[in-house]
């Protein structure tokens, strides 16, 4: 039995993958973001995508929603390849997807109520009373029914995020993508959001994809975790399995160590040289310049300018 | 030697013009879809039109007063002050009305369009609409484009009206020109189709050009505060240049 009360086995989970990604390859600005990524998102489950900053987690979500086309590979959602469908079909698919943006992306000219009602008004011709009831129900779920008439500028960061979540679920989508949902939430709101994610998943059978860094929060709700690093899936499994840190990637990421396969330092020229110490014949350790690299910092190997070999400045 | 040519300012500029042309085609394709957002179009007409009234009317009044004063002074040297109203009207209807209104429109409405759409881009509101299966070209851009085309001729007409009143105030009320001469010379010389409508067609074209540039700059801005600032500046600069250049071309064709 799970030690955590929030995370419970999902009895209603259906078999099979809702999303199948095969051979995904993406190059952006000369940097290889994905190099042959294969990934399955379980139908009705909560899948977390984790990884160091800059590994392309949000880019992966943009691929899944058809906002950005990959250079190669296929992304099948319910059997349809997102990379090959037309605009109309893509919009039909997006109507079934709720997306919680990193910065919430509320429409700043509209009140909280109108923001949540926006998808309903755009796609459905519902009586105003029904729109009102649906919106208030969703706002109640995120604890902001009383803030319905406020403008986004009047809300705190955590409240904005909860309004965005209410908007993402207002049409009861088949899938929700949460892009960094826990940032800026106080412990109370965080706990409620975690419960809401799990409740939506269990009661409505919604497939959830969670992009996050907070392992403690992710462990409470996720059924499986993909760890992205170096353009590939570095690790994949259940939260407890990954948290054990059996590989260098998981060990470094989940214990937050600076040393490991993911370099903490961005590739840089000779540190001593930049400080004006190298050429003056100081007696500190010689630091060779990092070789020029086209690999993103999170992918590049650890260079020799790391903290462990940093020369001590002369007194 | 590398086979790949490094981009430079000239190629970048041509690419931008091409992208702006494609953007125009996308807007035109989105116009039929935007008709379902009729209220949004009305709201934009109010925003770019009604909200620009004060600056347009005040500017028109003073431009007319200056024109009246200058022309009266110049024409008096030739004993032709009776033609003051006529020359003022010609200058306003054919050139100054549409051009000055377009320049003011770019500064007042164009910049606000660019800043608003640019901030929507920077704060992911455009992407959020895409994710909610709402076409931002139909919901955000096309209503503003239509509003610009509708509002510009109306603003130019108001500009002209206030300018004529300003010139009348200076020539007739202040300098003592005969009221009947002012109006009769003007009305007998001005041809509605050739002179007034020339200005109207120009203002329609200027409205389309200014809103196209403003929405393009906002839609394609770099999603940073600096990017929005540059885009807003570019809207004023490019709109002014294109309006003046287009004015010459249209004048050559419409004369």
Image: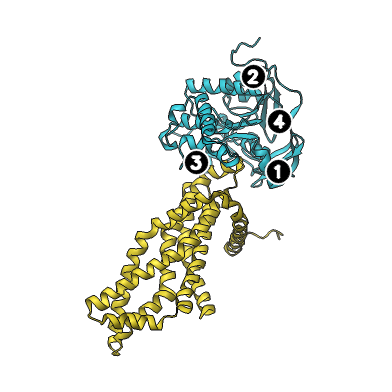
Chain colours: A cyan, B yellow
Are the residues under badges 1 and 4 in a single subunit?
yes
- Quadrant (top left/top right/bottom left/bottom right) for the N terminus of chain A: top right
Q: Circles 2 and 4: CB distance less than 8 Å?
A: no
| Residue at which label 2 appears | A243
Asked whether A224 or A85 is in front, the reply is: A85
Work out whether residue A91 can be spotted: yes
What is the secondary structure assignment of the residue under circle 2?
Answer: helix
Q: Around disc 4, counting alpha carbons within 10 Å, would you say few (fewer than 14), some (14 to 19), or many (20 or more)? A: some
In the drawing, what numbered circle is on residue A39?
none
Real-space Cα separation, disc 2 to disc 3, in angstroms: 38 Å
Distance (Cα) linking label 2 and label 4: 16 Å
Circles 2 and 3 on the same chain = yes
The residue wearing badge 1 is A89
Q: How many marks?
A: 4
Residue A44 drawn above or below residue A78:
above
Mark 3 lies on a secondary structure that is loop
Q: Position of residue B196 (x, y in %)?
A: 45, 75
Q: Residue at x 48, y 32 (%)?
A: A160
Q: Report how far apart the C-alphas of labels 3 and 4 lie in the structure.
A: 35 Å
Vertical arrangement, residue A9 with respect to residue A311, above or below: above
Q: Which residue is mark 4?
A: A233
Neighbor class of circle 1 (other Cα within 10 Å; few <14, some 14-19, many 20+) is few
Chain for numbered disc 2: A
Label 4 secondary element: strand
Label 2, residues with CA under 10 Å away: few <14, some 14-19, many ≥20:
some
Are the two marked residues, 1 and 4, in contact with CB atoms closer than 8 angstroms?
Answer: no
Dot placed on the residue nearer the N-terminal end, 2 or 4: 4
Q: CA distance from mark 1 to mark 2?
A: 39 Å
Q: Earlier in the sequence, mark 1 or mark 2?
A: 1
Nearer mark to the viewer, of 1 and 2:
1
For mark 1, name the chain.
A
Identify the secondary structure beneath mark 1: helix
């Amino acid at each position: 039995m799970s030690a955590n009360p929030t995370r419970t086995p999902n009895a209603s989970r259906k078999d099979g993958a809702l999303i199948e990604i095969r051979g995904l390859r993406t190059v952006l600005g000369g940097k290889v973001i994905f190099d042959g990524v294969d990934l399955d998102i379980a139908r009705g489950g909560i899948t977390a995508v984790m990884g160091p900053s800059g590994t392309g987690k949000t880019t992966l979500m943009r691929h899944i929603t058809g906002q950005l086309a990959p250079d190669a590979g296929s992304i099948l959602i319910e059997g349809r390849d997102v990379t090959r469908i037309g605009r109309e079909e893509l919009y039909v698919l997006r109507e079934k997807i709720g997306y919680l943006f990193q910065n919430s992306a509320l429409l700043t000219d509209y009140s909280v109520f109108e923001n949540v009602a926006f998808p309903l008004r755009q796609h459905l011709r519902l009586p105003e009373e029904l729109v009102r009831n649906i919106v208030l129900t969703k706002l109640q779920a995120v604890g902001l029914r009383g803030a319905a008439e406020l403008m986004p500028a009047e809300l705190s960061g955590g409240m904005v995020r909860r309004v965005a979540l209410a908007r993402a679920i207002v049409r009861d989508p088949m899938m929700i993508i949460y892009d960094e949902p826990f940032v800026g939430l106080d412990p109370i709101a965080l706990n409620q959001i975690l419960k809401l994610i799990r409740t939506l998943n269990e009661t409505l059978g919604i497939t959830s994809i969670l992009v996050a860094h907070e392992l403690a929060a992710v462990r409470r709700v996720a059924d499986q975790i993909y760890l992205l690093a170096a353009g590939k899936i570095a690790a994949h499994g259940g939260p407890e399995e990954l948290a054990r840190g059996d590989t260098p990637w998981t060990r470094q990421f989940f214990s937050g160590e600076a040393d490991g396969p993911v370099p903490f330092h961005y590739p840089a020229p000779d540190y001593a040289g930049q400080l004006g110490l190298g050429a003056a014949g100081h007696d500190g350790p010689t630091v060779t310049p990092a070789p020029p690299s086209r690999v993103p910092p999170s992918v590049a190997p650890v260079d020799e300018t790391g903290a462990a070999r940093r020369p001590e400045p002369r007194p | 030697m590398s086979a790949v040519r490094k981009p430079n300012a000239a190629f970048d500029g041509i690419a931008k013009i091409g992208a702006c042309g494609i953007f125009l085609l996308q807007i035109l394709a989105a116009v039929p879809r935007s008709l379902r957002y009729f209220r949004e179009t009305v709201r934009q007409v109010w925003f770019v039109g009604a909200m620009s009234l004060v600056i347009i009317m005040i500017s028109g009044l003073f431009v007319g007063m200056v024109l009246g004063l200058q022309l009266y002074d110049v024409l008096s040297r030739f004993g032709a002050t009776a033609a003051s109203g006529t020359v003022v009207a010609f200058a306003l209807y054919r050139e100054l009305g549409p051009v000055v209104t377009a320049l003011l429109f770019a500064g007042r409405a164009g910049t606000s369009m660019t800043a608003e759409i640019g901030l929507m881009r920077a704060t992911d509101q455009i992407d959020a609409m895409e994710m909610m299966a709402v076409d931002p070209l139909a919901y955000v851009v096309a209503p503003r484009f239509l509003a610009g085309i509708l509002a510009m001729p109306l603003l130019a007409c108001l500009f002209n009206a206030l300018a004529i009143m300003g010139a009348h105030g200076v020539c007739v009320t202040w300098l003592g020109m005969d009221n009947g001469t002012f109006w009769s010379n003007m009305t007998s010389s001005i041809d509605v189709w050739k002179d007034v409508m020339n200005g109207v067609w120009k203002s329609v074209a200027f409205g389309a050009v200014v809103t196209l540039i403003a929405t393009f700059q906002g839609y394609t801005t770099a999603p940073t505060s600096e990017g929005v600032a540059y885009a807003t500046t570019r809207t004023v600069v490019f709109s002014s240049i294109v309006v003046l250049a287009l004015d010459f071309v249209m004048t050559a064709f419409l004369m």
